[in-house]
Amino acid sequence: MTAVSSNSDALPALAEEVEQFVAAAGWDQPVQLFALVPTAELLRMQPELAGQLDAGSALTPIAQDSLPDGDLGAALAGIMWPDAVHGCALVQEIVVLPPEAEAQMNASDQDEEKLRQLAAEHPQRQEARLVAAVLRDGGEACVMRLRDHDDLLKGPDLAPNLTAALRATFT
């Protein structure tokens, strides 16, 4: 995976790059977490990577070990990044519902497992891959690809709860 050229300004492109990297393995992938580290620092510590990285790029995503199964929020709450990590990106496959179905489910008093089942069985559901990326010093980006579409939806507001949870890993 190549890196991109500046921190906050390049974060949306970096989120797209992470999505393309994960997409190369196809669908039905587990949640994946990436540390975003300064490329120059990475090359200083591991000069043998010089042929694999763009030395002019500000950050390089580095895949992390798998997160534990279960509650993603709880898994993220247990993460503390070292100072060398300037940001992180998380990729997960989600179910997207039309707004009226989502509002109906939000008003329901069903438990989380039942809501998950209802979403998975909804006739208008769409599967998607979501990438949320944040930087330690501010900046966030999200991209989402619907399973049956080539276009990427982009915007930091696609997953505000997830970007907040990722940002909390830096506090």
Image: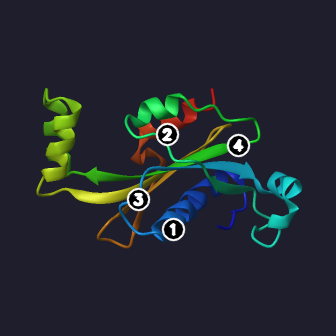
**Label 4 packing within 10 angstroms: few (<14), some (14-19), many (20+):** many
Residue 54 sits above or below residue 44 on the image: below
* Residue 49 visible here: yes
Q: CA separation, marks 1 and 2?
A: 19 Å
SS at badge 3: loop
Q: Amino acid at mark 4?
A: His
Identify the mark at residue 86; answer none if there is no mark: 4
Q: Earlier in the sequence, mark 1 or mark 2?
A: 1
SS at badge 4: loop
**Residue placed under numbered mark 2 in the picture:** 163
Which one is closest to the eye, mark 3 or mark 2?
A: 3
Task: Provide residue 116's location: percent of width, then percent of height.
Answer: 21, 42
Rendered residue at 46%/39% (across/down): 68
Residue 113 sits above or below residue 31 on the image: above
Rendered residue at 83%/51% (across/down): 41
**Residue placed under numbered mark 3 in the picture:** 29
Q: Amino acid at mark 3?
A: Gln
Which one is closest to the eye, mark 1 or mark 2?
A: 1
Q: Earlier in the sequence, mark 1 or mark 3?
A: 1
Question: Quadrant of the image for the N terminus?
Answer: bottom right
Q: Amino acid at mark 1?
A: Gln
SS at badge 1: helix
**Residue placed under numbered mark 1 in the picture:** 20
| Labelled pair 1, 2 in contact (Cβ < 8 Å) | no
Q: Is residue 42 left or right of residue 95?
A: right
**Label 2 packing within 10 angstroms: few (<14), some (14-19), many (20+):** many
Q: Earlier in the sequence, mark 3 or mark 2?
A: 3
Rendered residue at 50%/62% (across/down): 19
Q: CA separation, marks 3 and 4?
A: 25 Å
